Amino acid sequence: DAGVIQSPRHEVTEMGQEVTLRCKPISGHNSLFWYRQTMMRGLELLIYFNNNVPIDDSGMPEDRFSAKMPNASFSTLKIQPSEPRDSAVYFCASSLGAANTEAFFGQGTRLTVV
Amino acid sequence: GQSLEQPSEVTAVEGAIVQINCTYQTSGFYGLSWYQQHDGGAPTFLSYNALDGLEETGRFSSFLSRSDSYGYLLLQELQMKDSASYFCAVRDHGGATNKLIFGTGTLLAVQP
């Protein structure tokens, strides 16, 4: 398996634009996580899916952020409209089982909003 | 709420031993995990403790005390390549969410 695949690896966009980040989890994994990492706030959990269903979105910072998982092999995180403070590295991770703490991370998307 | 606290930075020399502590507060708890992240890379899984005691994996060991809500990662025979950030993590099943949350991270600098 190729591991968790995220795209794009880098994204530079202007304030106000819509940004869509994509993730393909490891085949067979039923838990998917979106994280945001910054120097100030560390690795924050944004949203967690189990069996394609959003279980906990309490970490989504505001209504500008939305996430979907239409099927077991694809998820998106959308920011609309984007703001400079959204600049961060966004990671997607997947794991097998509801209690498994071994999560596999993608290489991340480095987002810069100017 | 949930929180996992770690020291922000640790510095050590090659060949030495270093311990990175983690204290946690969660509403539900299965076990404690550790992840390593090199600068610019993705976090990678190192170890997991579900029960009290020490788990050893090569140069790395991890310890858990559930009664103290405390654990640590022990790195022996430090090498320059061990310079990275280290995170503790828990699968918090309080409220039946089972979300995976991470500590604040410890930046380890290994010096020659």
Image (cartoon, grey):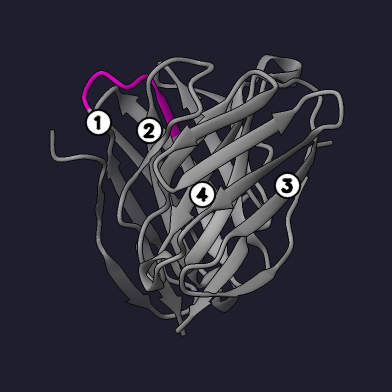
Is the residue at mark 1 from the same chain as the one at mark 3? no
Is the residue at mark 3 from the same chain as the one at mark 2? no
Q: Is residue A56 visible?
A: no
Which is nearer the eye, A94 or A58?
A94
Type of amino acid under label 4:
Tyr
Q: Nearer the viewer, mark 3 or mark 4?
A: 3
Q: Which residue is mark 2?
A: A94
| Disc 3 crowd, CA 10 A, few/some/many (<14, 14-19, 20+) | many
Q: Is residue A26 above or below residue B71?
A: above
In percent of width and height, residue B31 lies at 63, 24
Q: Main secondary structure of the magenta part?
A: loop
In reply to whether residue A72 is colored magenta, the answer given is no
Q: Which residue is mark 3?
A: B22
Q: Which residues are magenta?
A: A27-32
Q: CA distance from mark 1 to mark 3?
A: 29 Å
| Disc 2 crowd, CA 10 A, few/some/many (<14, 14-19, 20+) | many
Give the residue drawn at x 40%, y 68%.
B79
